[in-house]
Each structure stands twice: as C-alpha cells, then as structure tokens.
Amino acid sequence: MTKITFTFNGKPIELHTDPSRRFLDVIRNDLKHTGPKEGCGEGECGACAVLINGHIVNSCILPLANVHHQEVMTIEGFSKTKRYAVIEEAFIKEGAVQCGICIPGMIIAVESLLNRNPNPSDEEIRVGLSGNLCRCTGYNMIVKAVLRAKEMGKGLW
Amino acid sequence: MVRHRIPVTLEEALEHLNETTYKIIAGGTDLMVQNRAWSELPPKFDAPLLFCFNLEALKYVKEENAFIKIGSMTDLETLLHHPLTPEILRKVIYEMASPAIRKVSTLSGNIGNASPAADSLLALYALDAKVEIKSQKETRLSTVSELILGPRKTALKQNEIITEIIIPKSSFTQTCFVKVGGRRADAISKVAFVGCASVENNVIKDIRMTINAVAARLIRRQDIEKGLCEKTPDEVKQNVNAILEAYSTSIQPIDDQRSNKDYRKYTANNLIKAFLNTL
C-alpha cells in the first residue's frame, strides 16, 4: 500500500493502494467514474482517455503511481465546462456520434488537441485524433465536428 | 510482499536501486502492456517497481557546447515540439504511437526496453547518441548501440538508471524516415528506416543508414557507410546492388505476428535503395 495523492476533476484525492494498478481500474472501480471505457486495454483505441495536466493520456496503460501529484480530468469533469458544451453541440450538428463508445475518449482528444492548437487544419485534426478508434463514423463527421467546434468556440481555447 | 517505490528525487531512486533489485518504470507504455493481467487486476511484475516518471529533475532539453542533452524522463510529445530536438529525431517521433502515448513515452524507456522494432533508436543510432548512466557510486557514459545487447537485453546493471541522452549536434543536407506498419498511428514497425546524408558539391561527405525489425538488434553498418563517403551520388546509385549485397549479411529478419522474413528483407532493401536514389 502506498499513499497516492492527486487532483481528480478539481477535487483532491488521497488513495492507499497498489501504485502499479492501471489508472483506468482506479477511476472506474474506486472512484466510480465510468466515462472512460476499456476498449483494447493496450493503448491502441483511446476509449480510456483522460486528461492529465490538460493533455490526453491512455488510462488503461497508465500505472496509478504516475498520476501522483498530477491534475486529472475525466469526461465527467470536462462535461461541466463551456468548452465541452461547444464540442458537444458541434458533434451533434455534424452527426459525429453513432454508437457512442469512443466518444468520451474522442472528446478528450479534441480538448487536448485544441488546448495545444486552437486552429488545427484537417490534417492536424486527423493526427490529433490518431490514437482514437471509431468503428462507426469513418471519421469524416468527427473531423467536420472539430472544424465546427474550433469556429464556434473561438477565444475559448 | 512486493514493495513498489515512488521516489521524489534521483538520489532517493539511486538509494533504492542500491538496496535491492527493482524494475525501473517510466511512462509504462511498454511494461504495462507486456505485464498486463486480466482487466481490473494489477499487472504482474516479477520485481518491485521503481516509478521514475515523476522525477522532475530528469525532465529537460538543453544545449551544451556541441551536444543536445535530454533528461531521461522527458516525454516524446515534449521532444516533438521542442526547438532543440534534432530534425531526424523529430521526424521519427512524429510517426510514433499517438499523442496520448507520446505524452508518457520516453527515449530512455525505448532504450531500456531494447525492442528490435524500436523507432526512436533508429534516430539515436544514426546520430551517435550516448547515454549517461548513474548508480549511487558511479556515473558512466555509453553509446546507445553498445548499451543494447539484444531483444529486451541491455548492459544496464541492476543498480543503474539512465539519466540523460546526449546527442552530438550534426547537420545533414537530407534526412529521411520511413515506417512500414499496419496502421498510420499506434503501429509497431514491420520494418522502419532512417537515412541521413550530407552531399556537398556533388560529393557524399556523410551518410548514415539504420534499419529496425530485421535483426535481433538495429542495423547500422558504419563500414559500408564509410565506403560510400567521398563518392558522387551517381557512383553510389550505379552500385546499389553491391551495397545491398553488403547489407544482406546483417538483414536477417524473422517471421512474427506483424510480418514475415521475406517481406521484411524485400522492404528493407527497397528502403535503402529508395534513399540512395534520392542522393
């Protein structure tokens, strides 16, 4: 047992547990947040994505120890922000959500991308979302949604 | 009971390493997958872990005389955007994994994991990179290529940790990275190639070629490279078959789940040929 402290969706958290556990398991089982999903379990699909200090990270291959003293935000925390509202509306307008299982991770990837680059090109969007698989849309609607979000949310990022 | 550690300083990490055997883990993108257990269970490691990714003192990129020095816990996403990162290393990192994985991946992890298919090693071998290695009593330097002994095997001692990657500054008139993988992002290479060259007044002054995933260790044949220097690009292009023949003793790929021997050998030859034809 090791003491691990971090900020989780704005709240300080202290856990006493095995620091080698996958952060995804801690989020879903200990912290009861089920927004991040397990898809592949090896960092290839992005369904488990969370923000660490504002940057996308795959929580399924992240040992809990590596979030010690860091700021974590999941889709649940992010969904309370203005930026989320813009991305959500853009995804709805462009029909970018079908089955939905990739969407929490996809939205985390969009936020992480716009955080670093508020005005990405089509190519930069595809690179920014390259770690997130979507088996329904074929990606074009998602890319269009990001292009729409960056226009709608000018000044927010 | 397994006792993992999360040191706060390098000194503390070295002290732990001096006491007993630990598996050093940085971002964990390789180790967490290699040792994964069922969902919801902790990964299975055969030694306690020393978590070093949060050692802030090992996160930096700086220029010192003729060298770029990179702290061993610097993530690849930071390197991708850093102005001091050598051009060819940036080209390689751009095509490695995805933004999420790059944020927690390190050069030192790629070195320590010693995969024959590691992409960043292509650039590090070509750039003659060295590593600084520390134990509680000693600091030593090694070239990256000498440190890696074979698949998953390095010459790191159990009380040592890689603290810095040291890259001599160099300039080339052309650099090239080609990765052949199953997917544009997040793919492990079937085969990948780095070529760097300087051609001045139609004479090759410097040429370096590295290939991964076609042998137990990455390939760089400095003997062949030397033979190409001071020649004109046309002389080299006319001799392509002899050059490929010289490489063939080193290109000894295997079949695995990602590709097969014949494809790897054929593709590696084509990558060398294509690069030489751009000179």
Image (cartoon, rainbow, N blue to C red):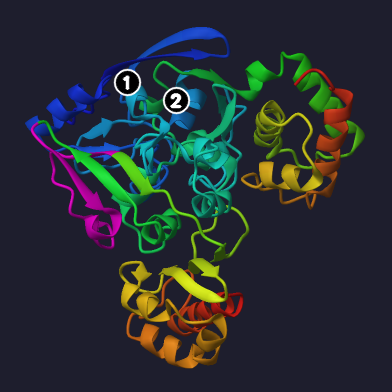
Report the residue at 71% width, 32% height from top.
A117
Considering depth in this image, is B266 or B227 the residue closer to the camera? B227
Report the residue at 52% width, 76% height from top.
B203
Considering depth in this image, is A122 or B209 the residue closer to the camera? B209
Decide whether residue B67 is among the magenta residues.
Answer: no
* Residue at mark 1: A17
Q: Give the range drawn in magenta.
A: B137-163
Q: In this view, does A66 lie above or below A78?
A: below
How far from the left and from the top, in percent, is residue A14? Answer: 39, 10
Mark 2 touches mark 1? (CB < 8 Å): yes
How far from the left and from the top, in percent, is residue A34? Answer: 59, 26
Q: In this view, does B29 lie above or below B172?
A: above
Q: How crowded is mark 2: few (under 14 residues within 10 Å), some or many (20 or more)?
A: some
Q: How crowded is mark 1: few (under 14 residues within 10 Å), some or many (20 or more)?
A: some
Q: How far apart are marks 2 and 1 (CA)?
A: 9 Å
* Residue at mark 2: A26
The subunit carrying tag 1 is A
Residue type at mark 2 is Val
Report the residue at 35% width, 59% height from top.
B115
Decide whether residue B156 is among the magenta residues.
Answer: yes
